[in-house]
Image (spheres, grey):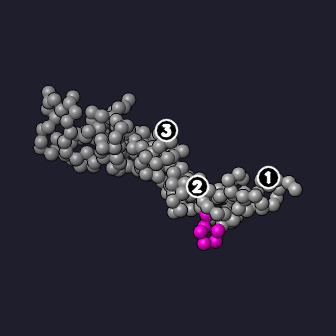
């Protein structure tokens, strides 16, 4: 009489199927017998059939290629902010930083992580801190390679002179108007004083 190792091609000991499951052997593949979720490689044991179920994007378990529960990876939808990730493609309108989805610091960072990003309104968080400080900005993702954050609009035709040459708003952190579109009205975004950059695009 021998012991019950996990390599004898026999279902014995505490195994739930041949050489798998239980407290000592490796987890079982899809379709193998199981007693609980921990017996299965997918982490899902079907209570009705008693068999290990394949990973899905709705089983409330982090399995398969998922980077967090039911999101990320090659098959599931992108993950929300704060969820786990391996790359920025695992994140929904966010970037992957230290294996966690967070809002981009600027349109430029978002473009660097999502090459297919389109021009329009996006949400950023320049201080990389609490999302309570997030705000929306207009991003141009095509001009000059894309990744431009609209910080201000200076318009003469709106007949309102809000940008006199000595006005404090050129240097302070104030904001006003609508900077989520290219309408011909004066405006200054929070991004004017918060987004760091190495280049300025003046677009007429």
Q: Position of residue 75 (x, y in %)?
A: 56, 58
Q: Is residue 196 covered in magenta?
A: no
Residues 166 and 53: in front is: 53
The residue positioned 16% from the left and 35% from the top of the image is 163
The answer to whether residue 162 is left or right of residue 106 is left
* Mark 2 vs 3, N-terminal side: 2
Q: In the figure, 170 relative to 83: above or below? A: above
Q: Quadrant of the N terminus?
A: bottom right
Q: Is residue 155 above or below residue 90?
A: above
Crowd tier of the residue under label 1, counting other residues whose Cα lies within 10 Å: few below 14, some 14–19, many 20 or above: some
Q: Which residues are magenta?
A: 45-50
Looking at the image, which residue is at 35% across and 48% down?
A: 122
**Residue, disc 3:** 98
Regarding mark 2 in the picture, which secondary structure is present there?
loop
Q: Which mark is residue 68?
A: none
Picture residue at 26% right of the left edge, 39% below the top: 190
Q: To which residue does mark 1 refer?
A: 5
Q: Locate residue 88, reporting x and y percent.
A: 49, 45
**How many dots with numbers?**
3
Residue 16 in which image quadrant? bottom right
Front tag of 2 and 3: 2
How far apart are the alpha carbons under marks 2 and 1? 27 Å
| Residue 155 place in picture, x, y as percent | 19, 41
N-term-proximal mark, 2 vs 1? 1
Q: Which residue is mark 2?
A: 63
Q: Nearer the viewer, mark 1 or mark 3?
A: 1
Q: Earlier in the sequence, mark 1 or mark 3?
A: 1
Q: Residue at x 51, y 54 (%)?
A: 69
């Amino acid at each position: 009489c021998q012991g019950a190792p996990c390599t004898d091609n026999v279902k014995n000991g505490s195994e739930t199927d041949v050489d798998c499951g239980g407290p000592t052997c490796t987890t079982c593949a899809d379709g193998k017998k199981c007693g609980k979720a921990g017996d299965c490689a997918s982490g899902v044991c079907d209570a009705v059939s008693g068999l290990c179920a394949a990973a899905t994007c709705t089983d409330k378990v982090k399995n398969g290629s998922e980077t967090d529960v039911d999101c990320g990876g090659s098959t599931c939808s992108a993950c929300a902010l704060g969820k786990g990730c391996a790359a920025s493609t695992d994140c929904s309108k966010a970037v992957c930083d230290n294996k966690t989805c967070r809002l981009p610091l600027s349109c430029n960072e978002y473009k660097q992580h999502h090459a297919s990003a389109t021009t329009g309104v996006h949400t950023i968080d320049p201080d990389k801190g609490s999302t309570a400080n997030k705000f929306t900005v207009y991003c141009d993702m095509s001009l000059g390679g894309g990744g431009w954050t609209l910080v201000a609009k200076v318009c003469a035709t709106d007949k309102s002179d809000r940008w006199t040459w000595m006005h404090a708003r050129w240097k302070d952190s104030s904001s006003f108007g609508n900077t989520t579109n290219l309408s011909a009205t004066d405006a200054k975004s929070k991004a004017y004083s918060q987004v760091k950059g190495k280049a300025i695009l003046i677009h007429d």
